[in-house]
Amino acid sequence: MRVFASILITFSLWPTLASAYAPPPEFIVSRSIKERKSLRSVEWTARITDMKTQTAFKEHLRVEFPSGRLFATYSGLSDEPYGSHEADSAALSRLGRFWMIVTLDSGGARVRSALSELGVLPGDTTESKLFRSGKSVMWGWGDAVRVFFGKDTFLPMGYSSRSESGSDSLSFESFMLAGNQLQVPKFAAVISGALSYRFEIRSVKVDVSAKAAPVATTRVEVPQVKGWVSLVR
């Protein structure tokens, strides 16, 4: 709980720091994409915890970046099946687009398209600002919608959106190395209204040959899992 509490921070409340030089947002985005090079796919097994009910379950996910295909299966901690979910990048939620495309995809055109759809594609007059949360310092831009990247690492660190209908936020606390190049978020916090989840990767692989997809999928019916899928997948 202490680790999770440290990342349940509303981005809009983070203080802005003065900066003598702020790299242009386009430079930050380009550096972030460069770190991922020619990544084709990611697979992981993760533990998801619904913080409201303290219900935990597993997510087994594969995302293929050139095709934009995502397939996930869900189960209880004792591996009882909870159903599966399949989507493509065009159908991802706003938080899902930031996580699966802006954070992980190696395709520059796809990343910039996602940023445009999210309303934070850098323009000629967009300026980067420094934000601090605890010991973390990040570059960020945007107003009602904001994105954050690590000051020195240029890793995507978070996304937040505020509107009259509510607010959403996704924040990454730490990353882990997958393969030789890819930094994958190890811990994440997702908050949307009364919903809040904690994500923790248990194992991850990159560029593994895909197995044949199931002929039919089963619907996710467990409420806590449905909430997770609706927010980020």
Image (spheres, helix red, strand yellow):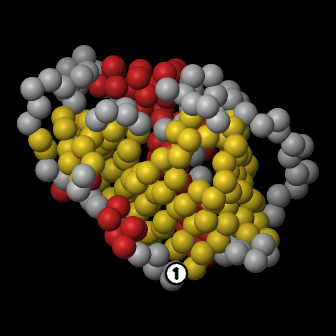
Res. 5 visible in picture: yes
Determine whether, in the image, residue 98 is placed left or right of residue 212: left
* Amino acid on which the number 1 mark rests in the picture: Gln
Q: Where the N terminus falls, by quadrant?
A: bottom left
Q: Position of residue 105 (x, y in %)?
A: 56, 32
In-image side of 75 versus 168 (left or right): right
Q: Residue at image x 14%, y 23%?
A: 21
Crowd band around label 1 with a 10 angstrom C-alpha radius: few (<14), some (14–19), many (20+): few
Q: Nearer the viewer, residue 221 or 15?
A: 15
Residue 193 lies, with reference to residue 171, above or below; the image says below
Identified at 69% across, 38% down, the residue is 206
SS label for mark 1: loop
Q: Quadrant of residue 118?
A: top left
Going 49% across and 22% down the picture, which residue do you hit? 34
Residue at numbered disc 1: 54
* Residue name at image x 62 percent, y 22 percent: 38
